[in-house]
Amino acid sequence: MIVLMITLLFSCEDNTSTLKQINSFNDSPVGIAYNIRMTYTDSAVVKAVLTAPVNLDYSHLSFQYSEFPDGLKVIFYDQENKENTVLADYGILYNQTKIVDLQGNVILLSHDGSRLETDQMYWDAAKEWLFTEQPFTFENSDYNLAANRLDTNKEFSKFQTGKLSGTIAVEEQQDSLSVNEKL
């Protein structure tokens, strides 16, 4: 009996390292692509084009995403095919929610010359909506604004802000009553 027990003890291998390797979290991307171009369409109409020098694909994870570590550029097209552009130093596209998290020197350039700058901006591709809770500045020919949050459509024609400050050009209209008129 003692010989059998000794034989069993010596015949067992230590597979701990192999088990750890099998069960370890694989945080490496499943794919790496260079100089990519992703086109977002709706009913065969191009809505946006995303380009980036590097794309890391993490679609093997339970919450799938793509990372753009060297920055990205997104061009949005409105119904008249006018372009609005977004640039960022870094981005993540969450595959299941279709939300892109843009970070670092985020700049939005509108076809009408408007410019918005912030440190972080989210783009909801499904709803064609941009939003941030970070401070931002917005400039165009009539406005020079700063605020701490923004919700806007991709054309920047509808937006809501919070704690607004800045200058706005307003046209003053002549009063309809003149001094010489009798009441």
Image (cartoon, rainbow, N blue to C red):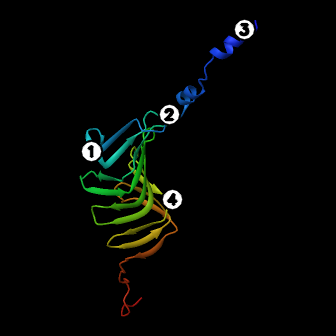
Badge 4, how many Cα within 10 Å: few under 14, some, many 20+? some
On residue 133, which mark appears? 4
Q: How far apart are marks 1 and 2 (CA)?
A: 29 Å
Residue found at the far front of this picture: 3
Q: Which of 143 and 138 is in front in this view?
A: 138
Single out the mark in the foreground, 4 or 2.
Answer: 2
Q: Position of residue 93 (x, y in %)?
A: 41, 45
In the image, what residue type sits under mark 2?
A: Ser
Single out the mark in the foreground, 1 or 4.
Answer: 4
Residue 89 falls in which quadrant of the image?
bottom left
Residue found at the far left of this picture: 81
On residue 3, which mark appears? 3
Q: Who's the residue at 72% across and 11% down the image?
A: 5
Q: Secondary structure beneath disc 3?
A: helix
Question: First in sequence: mark 3 or mark 1?
Answer: 3
Residue found at the far right of this picture: 2
